[in-house]
Amino acid sequence: MTFTPLSNFRTVWFADFEFRAEPGERPTPVCLVARELRSNRLVRQWLTDEIPNHPPFDVGPDSLLVAYYASAELGCCLALDWPMPKCVLDLYVEFRCLTNGKGTPNGWGLIGAMTYFGLDSMDATEKQSMRELAMRRGPHTLEERTDLLDYCQTDVDALPRLLDRMIGRIDMSRALLRGRYMRAVASMEHNGVLVDVETLRGLNEHWPAIQERLIERADPNGEVFDGRTFKADRWARYLVRHNIPWPKLPSDALALDDDTFRQAAKRDPELIGKWRELRNTLGKMRLSDLAVGSDGRNRCLLSPFQSRTGRNQPSNSKFIFGPSAWLRSLIKPAVGMSLAYIDYSQQEFGIAAAFSGDSNMMDAYRSGDPYLAFAKQAGAVPQDATKQSHKKERTLFKACTLGVQYGMGAESLAASIGEPLDIGRELLRLHRQTYPRFWRWSESAVDHAMLHGYLQTVFGWRLHVGADANPRSLANFPCQANGAEILRLACCLMTERGIGLCAPIHDAVLIEGPTDSIEHVVTEAQSAMREASAIVLGGFELETDAEIIYYPSRYSDERGVEMWNLVLAILAELAPVRFGFAEGQTGRGLGSNGTGCPSNLISIH
């Protein structure tokens, strides 16, 4: 067989590790098998006795590593202190790209990919038993070692056959960019996010009692809850009392899914935010699921390219940014270190402006406040209006802007802002009038999808579209998916420039660095993020905002501050010796304002 797209590489290695990975820990490699394409050279190494100081395969720019879910292999390289390969082709990612939107009957694992292309593969039951053997702590007998190496070789020998079926459908330059991101993923999973283990341990020990007292403190009069049960009829009365509009299902029942609560909490954090946090805290949250290693760092699979738009989808229960926002205050830098949370400003609005070429939209984005700029451009407020002087108008135009991005019609928009239908219609009319080029671009994207059966990003991440596709999802795909491309490229640039990247969070990143140089590190990270946006958007740069958290402060999400302080106060009552606070304090290790965002946290724009 021939692999023409691989002709630029001096060597092409197929490789697979077996490893043990406890929750929150870095992987412990057990064995490795690798085979070179042209020479057919085979390497089988057991890695628990004597560890070589360099991988048995080439890692230079003229060599290619081919793997399936390559972040696992690359993570093993990092755990062994080996250099990572410069060029990576991940057949898992390419299989996801080839089938995104189509679905696969046997999933996206190696067995599913082999079956999809009509290739024989190991039985799933046998594969699971071998994985369990690898996960078992040693020592392994000579026979077990041979079995594991044979199993590992089975996967390695499957890769050339799979590549032979896929190679004609792979755009190599773009595939290498996706493989480059898997190197960044391995680095982030290796670093992890440092958390306050002592407080987490206390929360776990007292969790049932904390939950009971939370209801007593947060809802003492049973305004919404009956015991630990959220009551829909009481919630309906609460909404009426506070004149809060709320979406309904076709059955006329209130929509009570978390996405509805999340959107409502963004519009009205004071009246909705607490209840969303409480629902999540009393619902499915299991603190013991949070994956924290012996070094106090939260690590889990970041699940890159898992969503239809290509974004990461880490486990909501294992990833520190997955559960309720208040729990993120467990994130705390080490002594002598600082953290920074850096996110793109109005990323989707900026992407839409750049791709549509709508000059009004570009001007609105560059103003720093696109929502108020929209209101000014539409003639709804004077040119000297500010957030303070025209707060209500800005809120309406913000809701319209965000609603358009998610395909809201006039009825949905009116319901979300609690205004008559005519207001919703007028806001959408003003948006169309102010940004006509954007609307033509957005509608043409939907037309392209329905006509050609697919949409794809600048770097070729493709969504296959069926006849039953939702036009609203299609309209949002270019912004969401290209936003994912921007963040992936930014992560590549940051890791390659030595920035301590801990985690990606949708359109943001968490980084760490020495306190005495963190501001310089943040400047470098923001530069990489702007550069990535300019590459994807043809020169149009997206701005970023950064918040630096200096030790001994902790990370804080404003949506969870009230709940965090309440939980910590309850913990102090339950375990006063370990978690009692001096007079005036509201949280262990917090600053003067008790929120985790004291005077030694600064914002950078």
Image (cartoon, helix red, strand yellow):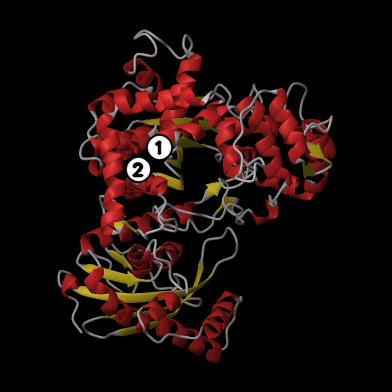
Instruction: Tell which tag, 2 or 1, sits nearer the viewer.
Output: 1
Please state, as top left, top right, bottom left or bottom right, where the C terminus lies in the image: top left
**Callout 2, which amino acid?**
Cys
Disc 2 + disc 1, Cβ < 8 Å: yes
- Residue 372 image position (x, y, % from top left): 40, 19
Q: Measuring 66% from the left and 56% from the top, which residue is drawn there?
A: 289
Q: Secondary structure at mark 1?
A: helix
Res 61 → quadrant = bottom left
Q: Is residue 94 left or right of residue 19?
A: left
Task: Tell me: residue 154, above or below residue 303.
Answer: below
- Residue at left offset 83%, top offset 30%: 220
The amino acid beneath tag 1 is Gln
Identify which residue, 176 or 29, lies in the foreground: 176
Determine the CA span between mark 2 and mark 1: 8 Å
- Rendering coords of residue 349 (x, y %): 35, 33
Name which quarter of the figure residue 125 lies in. Answer: bottom right
Between 387 and 254, the residue placed more toward the observer is 254
- Whichever of callouts 2 and 1 sits on the residue coming sooner in the sequence is 1
Which residue is depicted at the point 49% across and 21% down? 395
Category of crowding for the residue at label 2, using alpha-carbon neighbours closer than 10 angstroms: few (below 14), some (14–19), many (at least 20): many
Q: Which residue is label 2 attached to?
A: 479
What residue would you read off at disc 1?
405
